[in-house]
Image (tube, rainbow, N blue to C red):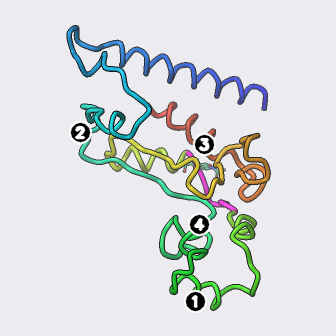
Amino acid sequence: MLIAERIKFNLFLVFVLLVCAVSSKCPKGNQQCSKEYEPTWESLDSRPLPQWYDNAKVGIFVHWGVYSVPSFGSEWFWINWKNGEKRYVEFMERNYPPGFTYQEFAHEFKGELFNATQWAQLFRESGAQYVVLTSKHHDGYCLWPSSRSFSWNSVDIGPKKDIVGEFIILSYSLM
Ligand SMILES: *[C@@H]1O[C@H](CO)[C@@H](O)[C@H](O)[C@H]1NC(C)=O
């Protein structure tokens, strides 16, 4: 466990260094690189699209979490249901007992077939230029053992696995 933690930390450092190396490759006189942004949407939205993102023709976003248990509608299941959207309410009435809570889905989020090696291989073979894992969606459930989200993360409840951790380690080994 301790070694795994250390490897993870080292990989994180490598990642930070890579990001620094890439961002310091800014051509002199390039206004976009030296531009400072304000904490407003207008300012943040004025950022240019990164070149690599624009060039990459195929990328993958993975949405996988507690909302995958009902697998109905979208990853916005909880709010759609609680906002009283008819088809969500009916889905719950049809399939779950009265009083069932969103949190109870987490027990059924087992991820027993999750295999980071297979994911990483599949992503690479697909030709995708980038992969984004939604490590935490709007329901707040973390796919890593976050101490800020105790009993609502993938190690405390659900798969009992550090999904993000396994995924990062495997992704780096395939780079
Ligand atoms: C994960 O998948 C890889 C590649 O298919 C396989 O070699 C490995 O045994 C699998 N791990 C588990 C725990 O099933």
**For numbered disc 1, what is the local secondary structure?**
helix
Q: CA distance from mark 3 to mark 1?
A: 33 Å
Mark positioned earlier in the residue sequence (3 or 1): 1
User: What residue span does the magenta drawing correspond to?
Assistant: 110-116
Q: Position of residue 106 (x, y in %)?
A: 71, 64
* Crowd around label 3: few <14 · some 14–19 · many ≥20 (10 Å): some
Mark positioned earlier in the residue sequence (4 or 2): 2
Q: Position of residue 31 (x, y in %)?
A: 23, 17
**Residue extending furthest toward the bottom:** 94
Q: CA distance from mark 2 to mark 1?
A: 41 Å
Image disc number at residue 67: 4
Q: Nearer the viewer, mark 3 or mark 1?
A: 1
Q: Quadrant of the N terminus?
A: top right
Classify 119 as above or below 81: above
**Which residue occupies 23% across, 39% down?**
54
**For numbered disc 3, what is the local secondary structure?**
helix
**Ligand 1 contact, mark 2 (Cβ < 8 Å):** no
Classify 50 as above or below 113: above
Q: Nearer the viewer, mark 1 or mark 4?
A: 1
Q: Which residue is mark 2?
A: 54
Mark positioned earlier in the residue sequence (3 or 4): 4
* Crowd around label 1: few <14 · some 14–19 · many ≥20 (10 Å): few
Q: Which residue is mark 3?
A: 164
Q: For the residue marked with disc 4, what is the amino acid?
A: Tyr
Mark positioned earlier in the residue sequence (2 or 1): 2
Q: Position of residue 131 (x, y in %)?
A: 42, 44
Q: For the residue marked with disc 1, what is the amino acid?
A: Glu
Classify 112 as above or below 87: above
| 40 inside magenta stretch | no
Q: Quadrant of the C terminus?
A: top left
Q: For the residue marked with disc 2, what is the amino acid?
A: Asp
Q: Which residue is mark 1?
A: 90
